[in-house]
Amino acid sequence: MEENDYYKQALKAAKGKNPDFEKAVALLEKAVKVGSSDAMYALGSWYFHGRHFEQDLEKGIEFWKQAADAGNTDAMLELGKFFEHEELGKKNLENAFSYYLEAALHGDGQACYEICRFFYYGFFVPKSEKISDVWRDKAEELGYEGATEEE
């Protein structure tokens, strides 16, 4: 069975009138073993937010890192947010910028907007409205609705 098959079956098991989270987790774990970045991202989110598991921020971060390494832009965004803010005392704007930039280079509109913000306010990078505008335009071009809001 392919990674997406396991992942789709896991989603199906987790939904409906009688969700079976044990089955969903087992299927997600199989999907992770065969390389599904979506499954890595899902497990990371479940652990990080304490959904269907006892909350384990470190384990969630590790799954998100695996997913990001496999090209999952949702995981890159989550890691960017994690490192931008104070959670676990691990604020690191360089890491946040790096994850946002990687997601932006993969064509994620929200990530382009996050890069826009970093340049607009001078977080980690030199403040530049000109560069900020370029990233905002890219975010708009990619359909990210938040890019049209005022700073």
Image (cartoon, rainbow, N blue to C red):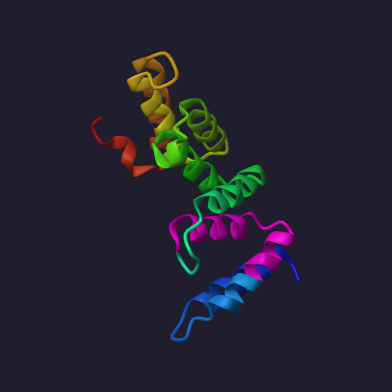
Residue 109: tell me if it is visible: no
> In the figure, 90 relative to 40: above or below?
above
- Picture coordinates of residue 138 (x, y %)? 44, 31
Front residue of 16/143: it is 16
- Magenta span includes 141: no
Q: How many marks?
A: 0
Q: Residue at x 61, y 75 (%)?
A: 9
Q: Position of residue 42 (x, y in %)?
A: 54, 60
The residue drawn where x is 54% and y is 42% is 76
Main SS category, magenta section: helix
Identify the image quadrant of residue 122: top left
Please tell me which residue is depicted at 33% across the width and 21% down the height of the picture.
Answer: 121
Horizontal relation, residue 151 to residue 21: left or right: left
Please determine whether, in this image, residue 8 is positioned above or below residue 124: below
Q: Position of residue 26 (x, y in %)?
A: 65, 72
Report the residue that reaches farthest toward the left: 150
Based on the picture, tell me whether residue 33 belongs to the magenta stretch: yes
Residue 73 spot, x, y in % from top left: 55, 45
Which quadrant holds the N terminus? bottom right
Between 115 and 79, the residue placed more toward the observer is 79
Residue 22 at least partly seen: yes
In the rendered view, would you say 55 is above or below 80? below
Residue 115 vertical placement versus 21 (above, below): above
Q: Which residues are magenta?
A: 27-50
Q: Is residue 97 left or right of residue 63?
A: left
Location of the C terminus (image quadrant):
top left
Residue farthest bottom in this picture: 18
Q: Residue at x 40, y 25 (%)?
A: 118
- Quarter of the image for residue 150 reads top left
Left or right, residue 61 beside residue 87: right
